Image (cartoon, rainbow, N blue to C red):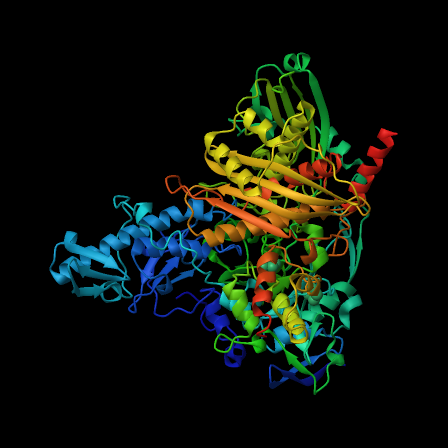
Amino acid sequence: MAETKTLRVNGASIIVGPAEPDTPLLYVLRNDAGLQGPHFGCGLGQCGACTVHINGEAVRSCQRPLSAIGPSDDIVTLEGLGTADKPHALQTAFIEEQAVQCGYCTNGMIMQAAAFLSKNKSPSEAEIKTALANNLCRCAAHLRIVRAVSRASGQA
Amino acid sequence: MNMIDGKFARRDVLKGTGALVIGFALAHCSPREQQTQVTVGQYGPPEDEIDSWISISQDGTATLYSGCCELGTGSSTGLLQVMAEELDIPFEKTQATGPDTNRTVDQFVSSGSRTIALHARPIRQAAAEARAALVEMASKRLNVPADRLVTDGGIVSVMGAPEKNISYGALVGNERFNLKVTGKVKPKDPSQYRIVGQPVKRIDTPGKVFGTFTYVHDVKIEGMLHGRVVRPPSHGASVIAIDESSVANMPGVVKVVREHDLVGVVCEREEQAVRAAEALKVTWSDWAGLPEMKDLYTTIRNTPEFPSGYADEKSRPMGVIAREGDVPAGLARAAKVVKTNYTTPYHHHGSIGPSCALADVRADGVTIWSGTQTPYGLREASAKFLGLPSQKVRLIRLEASGCYGQNGADDVVIDALVLSRAVGRPVRVQWMRGQENGWEAYKSARWFECQGGVDADGKIVAYETQTWGFSGYSRPEYHEPMHGGEPGSLVTAQLAGWEKPGLEEGFGGASNNFEPVYADIPNRFVKFTYLGPTSHRMGPLRMRVGSMRGVGSPDNIFVAESFIDELAVVAGADALEFRLRHKPTERMSAVFKAAASRANWQARPAFAKPTSGDIAKGRGIAALGGPRDTNVVGIFEVDVNRKTGAVHVTRAVVAQECGLIVNPALVTDQIEGGVIQNLSRGLFEEVMFDKSRVTTLDWSSYRIIRFPEIPDVLDVVLINRPDLPAMRVGEPASEVVWPALANAIYDAVGVRLRNMPFTPARVLEALAAQRQASL
Ligand code: FES
Ligand code: FES
């Protein structure tokens, strides 16, 4: 049965739905919460475009049903990671390194890298490449993305 | 400014996503002042009026109304640099808007890396004339002759008395110029450029990293519903029956829609549409008209030529690109002869975001939000499809996921129109991943036959390369300078029963750069055998083809530059020296030298010093260029793993000369992107199909490059030639990748890979065959 739910998103409580319990979190964030950071890329867990943080972990929101989200789960999207006034180190680094082409993958790159950097403060280039190995970019901004993540490491 | 007033959901505005309301018209920044108005004809405002291109607000911000589509390459930043330069206004005080058929000039298709090369011209001229007009106005206001005035930073001041000045905003703020673009004002000499040529940061990056950027996927309007389509299970299937009861009890279903073989569902919520489209029971007719994959290339070779497709190609009659001397005679006196075949597969564009559009079909007019590359062509195709005069349809173009050519961005508009018309409300449609891969227009597969010979002195005495292929282009719009378009090119219109064929595009672009870049080849024959238009729903080989980055050029260069290497090998020559021996142009030679010096190229024949052990090292070179086109040389160094078959690029040097460089950072960015994308295509990619349909419908069946596989080092060498016009930037460098790779693999392990992609399996197979042959 469709239900209305309260979620914690970017530090605020928002009411979403009514939606079926199997609704992927991605649609709820985009359409109910009006967020534009997470994108639909494959809906299959293969590309990373939909990545958000749940309790600090990078999660593919196209694969996470609404029913699996509890009231205390802390969801952070690209919008909540940082803003133009208070940017996250990765957001600054992506601008400095111009690591964005079409930008459709950028959400996933930054969110995946942010979760990674919070555990590994000064990774090698090879470690960064491994950490992002399941995030796809078709414009092939890879070199700049690696440079941006390196630049942000130690500051994140 | 242009917006559909009152149509946006209030809720979204209140939630602080207000950027979305203005976002669609001004994709990267909010308008600072009221904009000026223009009169709009069938193809936008008049091209020859300054107001059609530029307006200046009271605070001195200059807005550019560009008909060019930003494709994620930063071209809009480049266009703003051009405008800011000619206007003498700080780059920070500029903004861009459009395309929008209610406000911007028809600048045709934004493709072929031509935005800066071509479409900047009218903008440069309009800006130069706007500046001249501002000086005239200031001359009257300050009562000083115009030749004693200078412009800088958006201010006109008196020479030698800078305190006497007036700002652009004060002169014209929010007013129209009311002036024609005469062509009489001379734009700046490039030697005076202060903004053009600078590595200005892209205007769209902040929005994209903070999640505030509005893509076409993000547009929401009041009363909007969500649609998803249901595609046939095979390319040729038709609907036999639809069982609407299969979704009748599902939540949120508003309507099941069928128009001929275009089937879809409209729901209240997006996930409901996804589920209902999955659940809808449709009985389709059987169809199994594709060849077996293993027979693909013989099928292409045996497809009859399509002679009428050559009609418009005066420069290449009957597909003949070059015919000089006598090939058989040359072969007869050759000391060594090489005869080989090559193949290149179909490729997916592989946009990370599946195509999306929003349509609002109302009795009094239609609005479309689309990520198209051809706003006016698609607007007219849509109008024809709906049976409306084109001015009843407004198309607002927003940025989408990178497309690299003709993905489903245009097709999905027909889906949205059909669904919106059926329910009388605005409907947003996004394709699912498998639908994007299954129904877009692929890069055409190609078959090649080559023969050539060298004499005892190592000079080429005969050269013949031939290819068989389909169109490289099947967009819905006419070719510039003809305005407008036809729906028949869209597979969705074909599904919806639109019978009039689309535009017959011929083979044009697919044959580019097939001719060798070396002048001194006496007996040569180069031909493209055109097999006609083809799509999932019609044509000889029911795989839809369309343009993809470089169109046919990467395939042609793969073969031309691999085959020249094969000739160098039999001549026992160094690959670079052999190329220079056959006389590339002076411009091309300069690029060869720049690349060779950066890569520290040492002359020796290929595979002369094979490395032992599991990892074999090799290097390969390849070039592309034309007298009026960008010249590129790539030198790739690879590790080939003899055990696993994996190929890894340790270093790639790419030297490029593309005339005047508008923004070196953007050029480097495009070269990096192009090289890595084509490395992905060359190493991994091949669209697969069974007898009914394409089967590479996700990212596990269609593998693209991942971070660990990118080159360790990519070294870009730019040669700026301000004395030459700006030339193509995004495509050429990517086109040397495949032959440079194949040549490097040969150098490493002595096997020639002639069939793409160069997967580990292919490399191992070739190594096994080599071992067999040496037994
Ligand atoms: S959209 Fe979620 S992983 Fe691709
Ligand atoms: S920047 Fe376009 S997909 Fe990564």
Report which quarter residue B610 is drawn in: top right
Report which quarter residue B502 is drawn in: top right
Q: In which quarter of the image is ligand 1?
A: bottom right
Task: Indicate whether B294 appears above or below A22.
Answer: above
Furthest residue in direction left, as rendered: B143
Task: Indicate whether B531 appears above or below B428.
Answer: above
Task: Indicate whether B755 appears above or below B566.
Answer: below
- Image-based side of B705 in relation to B487, left or right: right
The residue at 30%/69% (across/down) is: B59
The percent coordinates of residue B636 (x first, y second) are 63, 42
The percent coordinates of residue B734 (x first, y second) are 59, 44
Front-most of A138 and B432? A138
Front-most of B719 and A108? B719
Report if residue B50 is visible in the image: yes
Front-most of B693 and B347? B347
Quadrant of image for the C terminus of chain B: top right
Task: Indicate whether B193 appears above or below B309.
Answer: below
- Image-based side of B241 in relation to B659, left or right: right
Disc tally is 0
The residue at 16%/51% (across/down) is: B147
The percent coordinates of residue B209 (x first, y second) are 54, 68
Quadrant of image for the N terminus of chain B: bottom left
Report if residue B289 is visible in the image: no
The percent coordinates of residue B529 (x first, y second) are 64, 28
- Image-based side of B159 in relation to A93, left or right: left
The residue at 70%/87% (across/down) is: A71
